[in-house]
Image (cartoon, grey):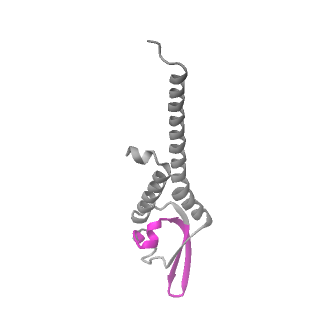
Amino acid sequence: MGAILKRPVLLGILIGVLLLVLCIFVPIPMYDGIFHYDNELVHIQTEGKVALSYYFGFGLEQVRANGILPTQIALKPIGYALIVLVHIGLPALVAIRFKMSNAKNAYSEASAKEQEIENPPNE
């Protein structure tokens, strides 16, 4: 685990992939979207929260309206923005945070070594 913390880009990619897999297989409706229902000659559009798992057929029973499954699911622009923020922005933020932490630790270690070289301990 310590080795992955030394590589923040790899940590960010790992967190991004884990979030994506979680959102694909577990129906977590958090993205704004539009459901399209077709029943004979009637076409109905409703707005609601969309989960990424709906695109793969997982959890569609939750969005059934009057026994009809949606024929099409579309994301609104804010839904696309939320996908980018959650699946790219959040892992990037974690990677940046660990990169800054690693840089701070490396700087403090280098300063401590420089202090030891300039001021050797008197014995």
Judge whether 14 appears above or below 61 on screen: above
Which quadrant of the rendered structure holds the C terminus? top left
Residue 15, horizontal then vertical, whole percent: 45, 54
Q: Magenta residues?
A: 33-60
Q: Residue at (55%, 21%) from the top-left corner?
A: 118
Judge whether 15 appears above or below 57 on screen: above
Residue 47 on the magenta segment: yes
Residue 20, horizontal then vertical, whole percent: 45, 61
Q: Is residue 15 left or right of residue 114?
A: left
| Quarter of the figure with residue 104 | top right
Residue 89, horizontal then vertical, whole percent: 56, 54
Residue 48 on the magenta segment: yes
How many labels were placed on the picture? Answer: 0
Q: Nearer the viewer, residue 79 or 19?
A: 19
Q: Residue at (55%, 47%) from the top-left corner?
A: 96
Residue 84, horizontal then vertical, whole percent: 56, 60
Q: Nearer the viewer, residue 25 or 121?
A: 121
| Quarter of the figure with residue 64 | bottom left
Judge whether 101 appears above or below 23 on screen: above
Q: Residue at (46%, 53%) from the top-left corner?
A: 10
Residue farthest along the bottom direction in this orientation: 41
